[in-house]
Image (tube, rainbow, N blue to C red):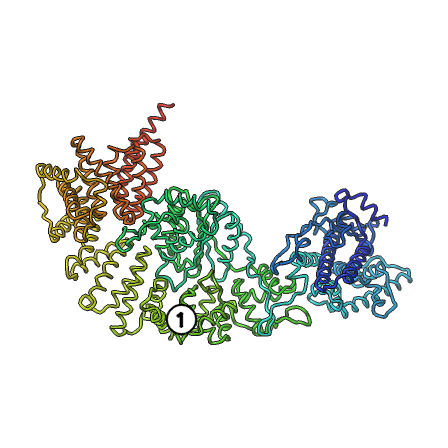
Amino acid sequence: PPSLKMLAENSNNHSIDAAVPLRKWIHDEAKKLTSSSAQQNIGSEHEKHKKETILRKTTVAYGMAELLRHARATTATLSSPSTGSEATLFSIDNFAVRLSDEAASNANANNIKGVDLILPQLSMNIIEPSFLRDSFSDGVKQDQMGRYLEVEFPTLTENANVGAAPVSQSEEDCRCRSLGLIFYELFSHISPFHYENYHGGTNGLKMEQCAESQMNYNDASQGPSQKKPKVTDAASSNAGREGREKLHYVIQKFLQDPLVELRFPSSICLVVQNLLECGEANRPDDAYDSLDAVCKDLHLLLLDPIRFLFDFELASENGNVQLSLRKHKLYGRENEVSLITDAFCRVSAGKSEAFFIGGFSGSGKSRLVNSLTNQVDISDGYVITHKFDQMSKERPLWEVISVFNELCILIMERRTQQDLNAMANSINDVFRADFSLLARLLPYIDALAPNFTSKEVKKESGGKMNFQSICFILQRFLRVVSSKSHPVMLFLDDLQWCDKSALMLIEGILSDSKCSSCVFFVGSYRSNEVEDDHEIFRLIDRLGSNDVPTTTLSLEGLNSEDLNTMMSDAMCMFPRLCKPFSDIVFEKTKGNPFFALEFLSSLVERGLLEYSACKRKWIWDERRICSMDVTGNVLYLVSSKMNGLSEDIQLALKVAACFGIKVKESIIGHLNTIQDFSNVQIGIEHAVNEGLMAKVGTSDFKFVHDKVREAAYSLIPDTEKKEFHYTLGMSLHSVNEGSNMDDIIFSIADQINHGMKGSPEQSPELQVKVAKINQKAGIKAVDCSDYKTASSYLSNTLSLLPTNHWKTHYDLSLRSHFLLAKSAYSCGDIEKAYAVLQEILRQAHSLSDKLDAYHLVVVILYGREAEEEAYMTTHDVLSQLGESIPDVFGKKETKAMVGATSKMLNDVSEESLLQMKEMDTKQQYLLKFYIIMTMISFFAKTGMVPFFTCRMVQLSMKHGICIYSLTGFVQYAAMVCSHNMLSDNIRQACRIGKLAMTVLKRFDSSTDQVARLFSIYYGFVALYSEQAQSVVDNLCKGFECGIATGDTSAGSVCAIMHVRTSLIAGMNLHTILERIDYYLDIMFKHGNQSAKTHLLLYRDTISILMGKECRNSS
């Protein structure tokens, strides 16, 4: 037509596209589909082509609706004689479809480039969405969504306002009805005004007549004030009346015989039906009220055709059709997603950061965090997560450490062998002498550094690791494994169940003064279950004080619109249609996403929300739903569902709930061998099928939500909970007694302890049995360096023993008391440790049983700066061990003893030291006490230092060698060098010291003396015989080893001597100053005031030197 030619000539934006009249395009589409049906022998292929056709027609329908909506925007456009009347505007012949030239020759191509309105002239370009290319490709997931469909209007100005003109509702109804008639022909290829030809009738009506009749019909219904000028032509009046009657007849026929009879999707049928219902006398609530609503619905069909456009078979369970939930979609959290994403991007730029999320249970905290994990993976980062729960409140520190242990496996799986080799070398360079400590803390480190193995660490008597040691080791580990290119995201869920120690560990990691790690910490908590003074908020304040960027976020329930979107997706219904229902759900659930979904599921189970196969949509009983009283009671909804399950499933849920949010598969396997729990394994598998639990990895089962676990736990009557826990624990113990139960000992002890708490006193035999179980759990915790957890289990051990336990269970009492004292000391509870040690000293039968307690008492006294009491206690112990210690040791005695010792060492070589026998236990204790005696004497009785030092060497030369012998050798070397004796003596001293450091490799797994050896040898000996740079590097190693092993004293000496030697070596002053600040930060955290004083003096001196340097340079 001329109008199409004019449009093609005037439109420069799409000159390469071919404009095809809409009526012809509809005919061509029908012809293609008919041809496809004739050629395809396989029904699925024809069905695929049919869906592609419907999708293309829906795209055209959306374009037409958008064009009419924009044309409606200006009233003048609709009424101007030059642009034609409304009748012409709403004619199917007033539209054209633009196809690309390349696609026009391909029958199966998705070739729609735009839709044009001829009069008034208006064009719309369609940006091709992804689903036109791949929605029907093989392997498409049901939840896949197309990209956002964009449209542009090249012939409109940029500031054109679509809603500028006022819209009359009656006129809008008329437009909607007209559009419905066009859509009917578009999808069915049946002209509405030749409808009778398809149903045995002969009457017909032209499209223009029908459209004009609609206008006249509409005018008559508006009343006198809105009527057009009266038409006096009687023939015209009769024609209008006849047109209105025929139009009403056609619409009624369509409503009686909708497109559904032609096997079109229910969504298309509904759109057309709701358009035709506009302006009816008994207008249904579902009828459209504007073209804007039509555009929104059509756009939704194109955005997610699988869910909204096409009818698909809904999942069925127990005869009920199930909701189509988007399990991984996050609704209404766009701003929150932006905040957490921006925070992670900052971490990827090289700065650790913290992000805290508060909110009610079920508000979507975990879902928000999970929305970020894909981006972390894309950026080559690592995501490690842990969820705390009420059942594991005794060991949160160990659980956090275990998360970093799992990080080792994750890195191994993600990195190439070349990357792993480079990382192994870096780990070895950083940890060096104290690699065994890292291996003790993170056993899976072997996955990253398999070639750097060390001998078995004697765990109970090894280095004095404490909380600060653990923190320091993890800081250094993360400096190696995290980086800008490989950031680490740590997500800890339900922090309200976490204790202070675990939160302080997080603080230490994030507050690393070197700022060389890239860690993104995310913590979530239930805001309604924490007070204002909770440790979470104190942590947030401390992180701010330490200049760690911190973001806090509070999640409320979804607003009504977002909840409606979620329900629209679940029911595959247009949002406008489910809005009345979603308003009810919003009132009941306050927008809590988890609560809302559980509420919907419960309605389906009760038959109050059901899918009507006849109507092909969800229907609900509004009256009964409104009368339900469920506000805030999500637990009741979930537990009600569980009550309808089989006994086996309920038992499995009860069992799993007793172990917390997650239960090990090995535990289920052990229980399954017991008659009372023989069906637990099957029950767990059914619980997974019911969607209540999920398999995590290869060894755990996890509840899908903490509220589900709470509901499962509520299945156990309150009066029976303790007995149930106790039975579980004792059953697990019975099937594992006599075998290695290390992997489940915590679970066994927790269940029994929970069951016995507050219960009547059990028989003495049973209590002793449980005490031994707790002791095993305590030893396991000590081996894991989780001294807080160990302290809890060991305290339980002692509380379960009878009052005369020192007589009846001496060995159990002695070991438990010392381990408890050691754990309390490592946790910083010095008073408790000292009290327990005094109990040991009072009750132990022999000196040998008291030696470990005495040694720790002296360490505590020395730490309190009670040197005199520490000296006298050590003096007393050495005397009891048979040593004779003079009260005074003068210069004459010193010279004689040093000379005798020197002669003993003249012929000592590396080979002779290595061939010496190992010293027996008693002599090793002597050396341990002499070492600490030397430290105390340095401040309390300086004149006695040579005696103690020489005595250590003499004992080693007489009775054999041990790790403490090496400390004696280097202390002797340091004594000789520091007293400026003859050069020959200094050379011998350096030789002996170097021999000791060489032989240290024989004891590379016993690191409790390494830091002291480094501090003495490299601080006071090595500078006489080794290069200064080598001494500086080894002092740095000694500092790291000292802090890692809990020997802060030796570590601080290494730090001070490192600064001193760096100055001697002429290192850059800026570098030294940065190192001093690093040392000061660590000494502040350890409360070492003496070391701080020395370091501050060095810092002030260097600052003055730098100031002079700056003035001279200026």
* Count of all numbered marks drawn on residues in the image: 1
Secondary element at image label 1:
helix
* Quadrant in the picture for the C terminus: top left
Please name the residue shown 54% across and 62% down the image: 591
> For this rendering, which residue is in front, 640 or 815?
815
Q: Position of residue 644 (x, y in %)?
A: 51, 75
> For this rendering, which residue is in front, 1052 or 429?
429
Q: Quadrant of residue 655?
A: bottom left
> For this rendering, which residue is in front, 868 or 273?
868
Local packing at callout 1 (Cα closer than 10 Å; few below 14, some 14-19, many 20+) is many
Say whether residue 872 is visible.
Answer: yes
Position of residue 375 relative to residue 215, above or below, is above
Q: Position of residue 470 (x, y in %)?
A: 34, 50
Position of residue 768 relative to residue 562, above or below, is below
Say whether residue 73 is visible.
Answer: no
Left or right, residue 976 beside residue 652:
left
The residue under label 1 is 671
Q: Position of residue 77 (x, y in %)?
A: 78, 50
Left or right, residue 490 beside residue 194:
left
Left or right, residue 143 beside residue 981:
right
Query: Which amino acid, by three-letter code, is at mark 1?
Result: Leu
Q: Position of residue 978 (x, y in %)?
A: 19, 35
Please name the residue shown 52% across and 72% down the image: 629
